[in-house]
């Protein structure tokens, strides 16, 4: 029985492969000329990969047909301290015999005796590359030999090689290495690569090298030039990197082409950001938004993506919808997008109700916006410590950490301003340069809080060398949200570690905006920030005097909680107070007001 993708394959070809399963390979050989002839002929007829699995007795135990870039592998029994006793021989219709990222992944995970890739080309002789397991510092790694010709492959002493590998496996403690080691590639500036390194770190990916190529025009097929791609392939092999991350968004065909040249998994900046969001999302709303952005990103790329959507893939870029099967149906994705949009619409309705309630209660709305890791969540927690209403002081703090996108879940808390007015402060998702458009679209229900705010506190990391670029990136997203005309205070955060030169440079460039210097971590200037916030809101409190009898001292306590008490005296009739309060306070104590 021939497995894999046999749809549309003629019975004559299937019969040919069935008959080929009877071929016996010598125990001392990796393959035979007879088997190669059949695999090559079928590959040329179908333009698809064909794979044969061979045991140590020389029997072909399975045969499979794949697509242009992948082929299904058989279920193999993996035992501790030894190889699986199975060889995989498969074809590459593109003529490139170099082992792909999937080939290497299968070799290590299945502990194959060896894996052979045959580059099938009508113009050139067949080329062969062989992959073996090896051990490096107690970690199982791959070793590739080739390209070789057919005589060199047939004469190769596979028995001695397998015996040597298994001896090493028995005498060494083997550690499964699931870590991802990346080479980062960019074409703009070193600053972008520094930020990409931080994004990779947020995904627990170790950066082992960075490469920058100055290009005025993007290569349609490989994003970078072929020469540079082959240079990166050599560096990747030497450093044993297992992933290459590009600083810009790649098309599906570019990902596939790069994976063929580089021989490892390739992802772009957008995939990396989506992965961070997928890991950090905690609430149902955030998870829906991330899933929606992932589906929108993947929909036009299904036909192009290679390793990323493979069932044998692992690590970043494979989390979320679509990691379990390569043949995702576009119709199902569109249905998923429709369902998620409906759920988000319900959440948007709930937010609108909450927003209208705050409007009726005359609560001013403040949103913290800014670049990721500028200190928004730290500031929000610090403001709650110094100015939170007594009724909400016990609420949980927002997670804060020195990392990109530490907070995804939007929270709103009530603060008591110095003039005794209540304001709702919302902590929003951080922005970043080249923020994926699909992500902005998906998070619009959350970012609507920014649109309906009375004041934006634009938090800036004043210690960053790229602070001005970060401000510009935030402005771009605010324009996309149609919120760039909102009243704004530029909050220069982290002044405890920022240079005075950097602070002055930012203030000079943005002298048209109101700026204030703070340290959210140390609590520096927070009272001043609250006072400046008060000045931006129209003053709507009424000033009046009340005389409250001693029999209703609960009203005195209420006024202390919900209004600003300018003076308080005690006389024979009761408590005489001079008060500033909103309409609700005025109406509640109207019977005690002195005309």
Image (cartoon, rainbow, N blue to C red):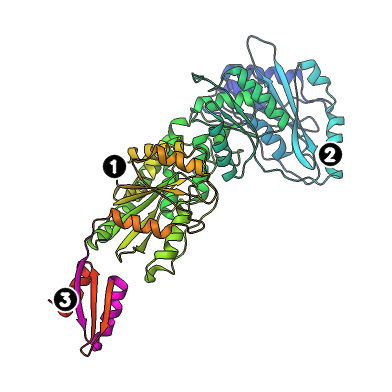
Upstream in the sequence, badge 2 or badge 3?
Answer: 2
Give the Cα distance between marks 3 and 1.
39 Å
The numbered mark at residue 166 is 2
Which segment did they paint magenta? 539-564
Residues marked 1 and 2 touching at CB (< 8 Å): no
Label 1 sits on residue: 485
The numbered mark at residue 590 is 3
Compare residues 158 and 341 and report the one nearer the observer. Answer: 341
Magenta stretch encompasses residue 232: no
- Identify the secondary structure beneath mark 3: helix
Q: Find the residue positioned furthest to the left.
A: 595
How many numbered markers are drawn?
3
Q: Which quadrant holds residue 563?
A: bottom left
Does residue 543 sit above or below 294 in this rendering?
below
Q: Is residue 545 visible?
A: yes
- At x 83%, y 20%, the residue is 155
């Amino acid at each position: 029985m021939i497995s894999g993708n046999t749809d549309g394959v003629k019975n004559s070809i299937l019969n040919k492969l069935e008959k080929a399963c009877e071929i016996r390979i010598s125990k001392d050989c990796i393959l035979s000329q007879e088997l190669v002839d059949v695999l090559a002929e079928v590959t040329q007829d179908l333009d698809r990969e064909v794979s044969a699995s061979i045991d140590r007795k020389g029997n072909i135990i399975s045969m499979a047909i794949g697509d242009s870039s992948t082929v299904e592998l058989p279920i193999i029994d993996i035992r501790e301290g030894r190889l699986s006793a199975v060889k995989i021989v498969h074809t590459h219709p593109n003529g490139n015999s170099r082992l792909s990222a999937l080939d290497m992944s299968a070799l290590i995970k299945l502990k194959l005796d060896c894996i052979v890739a045959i580059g099938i080309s009508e113009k050139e002789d067949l080329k062969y590359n062989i992959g073996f397991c090896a051990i490096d510092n107690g970690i199982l790694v791959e070793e590739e030999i080739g390209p070789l010709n057919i005589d060199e492959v047939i004469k190769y002493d596979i028995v001695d090689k397998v015996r040597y590998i298994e001896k090493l496996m028995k005498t060494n403690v083997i550690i499964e290495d699931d870590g991802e080691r990346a080479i980062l590639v960019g074409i703009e500036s070193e600053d972008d690569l520094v930020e990409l390194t931080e994004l990779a770190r947020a995904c627990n990916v170790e950066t082992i090298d960075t490469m920058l190529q100055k290009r005025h025009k993007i290569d349609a097929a490989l994003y970078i030039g072929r020469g540079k791609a082959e240079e990166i392939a050599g560096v990747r092999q030497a450093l044993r990197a297992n992933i290459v991350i590009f600083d810009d968004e790649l098309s599906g065909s570019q990902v596939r082409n790069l994976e063929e040249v580089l021989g490892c998994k390739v992802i772009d900046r957008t995939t990396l950001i989506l992965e961070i969001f997928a890991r950090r999302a905690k609430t149902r709303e955030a998870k829906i938004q991330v899933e929606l952005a992932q589906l929108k990103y993947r929909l036009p790329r299904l036909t192009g993506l290679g390793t990323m959507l493979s069932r044998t893939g692992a690590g970043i870029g494979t989390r979320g919808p679509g990691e379990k099967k390569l043949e995702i149906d576009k119709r199902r994705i569109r249905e998923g997008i429709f369902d998620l949009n409906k759920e988000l619409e319900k959440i948007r309705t709930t937010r609108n109700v909450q927003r209208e309630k705050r409007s009726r209660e005359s609560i001013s709305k403040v949103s913290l916006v800014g670049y990721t890791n500028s200190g928004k969540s730290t500031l929000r927690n610090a403001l709650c410590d110094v100015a939170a209403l007594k009724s909400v002081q016990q609420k949980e703090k927002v997670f804060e950490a020195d990392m990109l996108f530490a907070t995804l879940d939007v929270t709103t808390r009530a603060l008591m301003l110095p003039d005794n007015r209540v304001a709702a402060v919302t902590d929003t998702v951080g922005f970043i340069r080249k923020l994926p458009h699909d992500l902005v679209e998906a998070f619009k229900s959350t970012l609507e809080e920014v649109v309906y705010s009375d004041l934006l506190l634009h938090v800036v990391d004043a210690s960053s060398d790229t602070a001005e670029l970060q401000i510009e990136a935030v402005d771009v997203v605010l324009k996309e949200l149609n919120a760039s005309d909102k009243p704004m205070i530029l909050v220069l955060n982290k002044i405890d570690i920022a240079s005075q030169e950097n602070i002055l440079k930012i203030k000079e460039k943005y002298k048209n905006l109101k700026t204030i210097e703070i340290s959210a971590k140390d609590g520096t200037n927070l009272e001043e920030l609250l006072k400046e916030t008060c000045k931006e809101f129209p003053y709507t409190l009424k000033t009046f005097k009340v005389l409250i009898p001693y029999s209703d001292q609960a009203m005195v306590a209420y006024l202390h909680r919900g209004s600003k008490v300018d003076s308080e005296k005690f006389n024979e009739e009761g408590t005489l107070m001079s008060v500033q309060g909103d309409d609700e306070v005025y109406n509640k104590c109207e019977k005690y007001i002195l005309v």
